[in-house]
Image (spheres, rainbow, N blue to C red):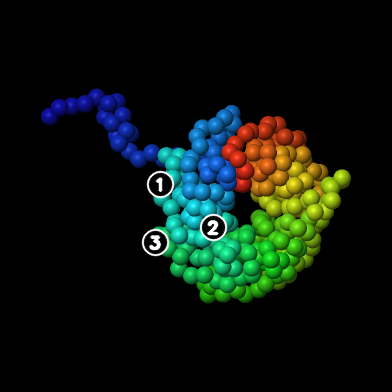
């Protein structure tokens, strides 16, 4: 029997093993007009790759172990599935009309997606990649958030100015909460007691008491020198300690830094044009902001509350997420 050196055998085993990627540090940015997801190095912020997707990718989200990235492609009528190790689309959930915002259940079994044209929440089984049920909500549903215990899904209705509360066990709505005009996205406080929802045409964020499903407070954004109609909050990201929230305020080209307990804006950070969505990195030292009209990502140093770099990406960037 022929014997091989141990080093050669080890190399052979490694070469034949599947590729895995964990905590790459990469940034992934969806671009609506270029039909790509741009991958940036998390340290140098140089472009690694443009991943070709179906038409008009918008919302992005990892599966729980971050081996896959799901991209809702509105004009492609699909949710493309990107393999993080390969940095390419390897699968898709097809035949979904104009998909936009979604969330994945904590057990990674179900994907909940807003179906804008149908005025419904779609429930997709991730094993079969088939839609198993739809739940009627208000017109033009947008933001979707699954609770950490998987028992509840929240959906905004842009036309009805309402947050719908869906029981996942029964698939039925158990509450409808009126908020500001054109509600968009959510953030749940780390203790699970408060749900924050941005209202794009009201220049505000409503704060919902989760236990009672009622609005307990409201925060208004008013940077100096802007008319109300130019202040269009959409994205929201909250720190892990629940003390600070970062809210993108759209056409005002700024991010509001909010003291959560005081319900007060501490400052506004000037970023790119039409700040749309934002996310923090794992250690919360940096905030990444997708700017839809300047075709770039602003990198904000959280301690200094200042932009340290602007990185060009594809045309009309919609969302940025970080694999760390």
Q: Is residue 201 above or below residue 323?
A: below
SS at badge 1 = strand
State which mark lies toward you, 1 or 2: 2
**In front of the other: 165 or 82:** 82
The residue at 68%/31% (across/down) is: 309
Of the numbered discs in the image, which one, if any, rests on residue 65?
none
Can you give x and y, in whole percent of width and height, for residue 108 in the image? Answer: 47, 57
The residue at 52%/65% (across/down) is: 122
Which comes sooner in the sequence, label 3 or label 2? Answer: 2
Of the numbered discs in the image, which one, if any, rests on residue 99?
2
Q: Residues within 10 Å of mark 2 (few under 14, many from 20)?
A: many
Residue labelled with disc 3 = 128
Q: Residues within 10 Å of mark 1 (few under 14, many from 20)?
A: few
| Residue closest to the far left | 1
Q: Residues within 10 Å of mark 3 (few under 14, many from 20)?
A: few
**Could you give the CA–CA distance between mark 3 and mark 2, rounded to whole angstroms?**
18 Å
Q: Quadrant of the N terminus?
A: top left
């Amino acid at each position: 029997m022929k014997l091989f050196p141990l080093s050669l055998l080890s190399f052979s085993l490694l070469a034949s093993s599947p590729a895995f990627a964990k905590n790459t540090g990469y940034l992934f940015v969806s671009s609506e007009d270029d039909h790509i997801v741009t991958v940036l190095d998390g340290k140098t912020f140089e472009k690694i790759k443009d991943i070709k997707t179906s038409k008009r990718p918008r919302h992005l989200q990892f599966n729980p172990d971050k081996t896959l990235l799901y991209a809702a492609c509105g004009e492609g009528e699909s949710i493309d599935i990107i393999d993080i190790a390969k940095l390419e689309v390897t699968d898709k959930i097809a035949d979904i009309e104009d998909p936009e915002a979604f969330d994945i259940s904590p057990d990674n079994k179900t994907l909940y997606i807003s179906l804008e044209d149908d005025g419904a929440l779609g429930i997709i089984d991730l094993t079969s990649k088939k839609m198993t049920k739809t739940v009627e909500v208000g017109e033009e549903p947008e933001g979707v958030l699954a609770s950490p215990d998987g028992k509840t899904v929240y959906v905004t209705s842009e036309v009805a100015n309402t947050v719908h509360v869906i029981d996942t066990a029964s698939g039925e709505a158990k509450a409808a909460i009126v908020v500001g005009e054109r509600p968009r996205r959510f953030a749940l406080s780390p203790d699970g007691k408060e749900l924050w929802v941005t209202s794009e045409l009201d220049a505000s964020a409503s704060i919902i008491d989760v236990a009672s499903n009622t609005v307990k407070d409201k925060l208004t954004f008013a940077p100096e020198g802007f008319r109300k109609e130019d202040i269009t909050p959409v994205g929201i990201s909250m720190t892990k300690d629940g003390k600070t929230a970062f809210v993108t305020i759209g056409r005002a080209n700024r991010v509001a830094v909010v003291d959560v307990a005081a319900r007060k804006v501490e400052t506004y950070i000037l970023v790119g044009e039409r700040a749309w969505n934002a996310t923090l990195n794992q250690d919360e030292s940096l905030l990444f902001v997708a700017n839809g009209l300047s075709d770039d990502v602003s990198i904000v140093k959280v301690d200094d509350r200042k932009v340290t770099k602007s990185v060009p990406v594809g045309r009309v960037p919609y969302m940025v997420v970080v694999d760390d």
